[in-house]
Image (cartoon, helix red, strand yellow):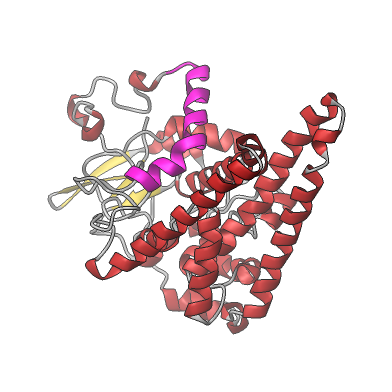
Amino acid sequence: MTPNIESEQTVTQRKVGEKVVYERDWQLPEFTIKEIRDAIPAHCFKRDTLRSFGHLAHDLVIIAILAYAATFIDALPEAYRYVLWPLYWVAQGIVSTGVWVIAHECGHQAFSPSKFINNSVGWVLHSALLVPYHSWRISHSHHHKATGHLTKDQVFVPSTRSKLDLPPKDQDPEDGMHHSMFDEAPITTLLKFAIMFSGGWQAYLLVNSTGQDYGRWTSHFHTSSPIFEPHQFWDVIVSVVGIIGMLSTLAYSSIVFSPLAVAKYYIIPYMMVNFWLILITFLQHTDPALPHYREAVWNFQRGAALTIDRSYGWLLNYFHHHIADTHVAHHFFSQMPHYHAEEATSHIKKVLGKAYVNDDTPIPIALWRSYTQCKFVEDEGDVVFFQH
């Protein structure tokens, strides 16, 4: 199912008791988690530790081969270097994103039936990628428990009309499908893309950028952050220790090898990983064709269906362990290993019917559309869509 952007022209409004519900011919789905789970073969939920380590070894071997091959680049003529270093950065970023996905599975306890193995492997892998493992595992769990909930979801939370200081809907002279305040030159939008993809992930971890507004400073590195419960104090500390350990390793490597070497072999591929992470997660949960729900109509299964499967082509799907093209299944059953997600998706589609959303729009076009058309939602209403 490709999102029907033309439905933007059919925005209607109706009174329900004292509430105003905005909708675009949207029908709230009524399926249950049991119906979906019963449609999926039981073996899809099996976590195989050895198989999971096999996928991890696959990625780490390729990463090592790429890094070793890169040691020969600077011995080549300058013209070759200008071509081969970018190729290395792109390739290493793609494969390393797969490691990020496996670490993310550890946080969901999907890597192994053993909690110790999950958390040990996840802590090592995510720390190596400068992700505070437990801190992000906790906040990401909040996201999964409240996906699509306008006031409880954790990340990519839409701004409301009032937060952007727009006039009330009934007093807005530009109310409709477009506000001129969002007009900007294409070069400005591209500059914002550069900022989002280069620093958006760090901004989220450090200061909760694009996250739920808790009314006070929120950070993945602060033990008293509203993201965490008091009993999670040591989880945050252990996460910070992992980051300090990796930063220390990078600093020492800069002394032994040189800062330039660390930048070429690690920092730039690390930035490529962040690019894929932001791109994939943004497009999984931001689209003008899908609404957000407020408390009166939200439930877990409805929220889980408010995500979009997108294919990035067979090569990227393969190296990214299908995190993008089977994300709906992942939101329904986050403990399901990635190597069963494609099979599970084929069964989930049958139960969800038209509530299952797969968008085949080319990724650059989908990115531009979502970024330019998903600006705010109304302050009132149980089912609200992005407007611009």
Residue 384 sits above or below residue 164 on the image: below
In magenta segment, residue 201: yes
Query: Viewer-proximal residue, 367 or 345?
Result: 367
Residue 218 sits above or below residue 103 on the image: above
Q: Position of residue 14 (x, y in %)?
A: 24, 45
Q: Position of residue 377 (x, y in %)?
A: 31, 39
Residue at (47% x, 30% y) in the render: 195
- Tell me which segment is drawn in magenta: 184-208
In magenta segment, residue 89: no
Residue 96 sits above or below residue 29 on the image: above
Q: Is residue 141 visible?
A: no
Q: Position of residue 230 (x, y in %)?
A: 23, 67
Residue 297 lies in what quarter of the image?
bottom left
The residue sitting at the front extreme is: 256
Query: Viewer-proximal residue, 344 or 256?
Result: 256
In-image side of 276 versus 235 (left or right)? right
Q: How many marks?
A: 0
Q: Position of residue 117 (x, y in %)?
A: 53, 77
In-image side of 302 versus 35 (left or right)? left
Residue at (67% x, 79% y) in the render: 50
Q: Is residue 176 visible?
A: yes
Quadrant where the C terminus lies?
Answer: top left
The residue sitting at the right extreme is: 77
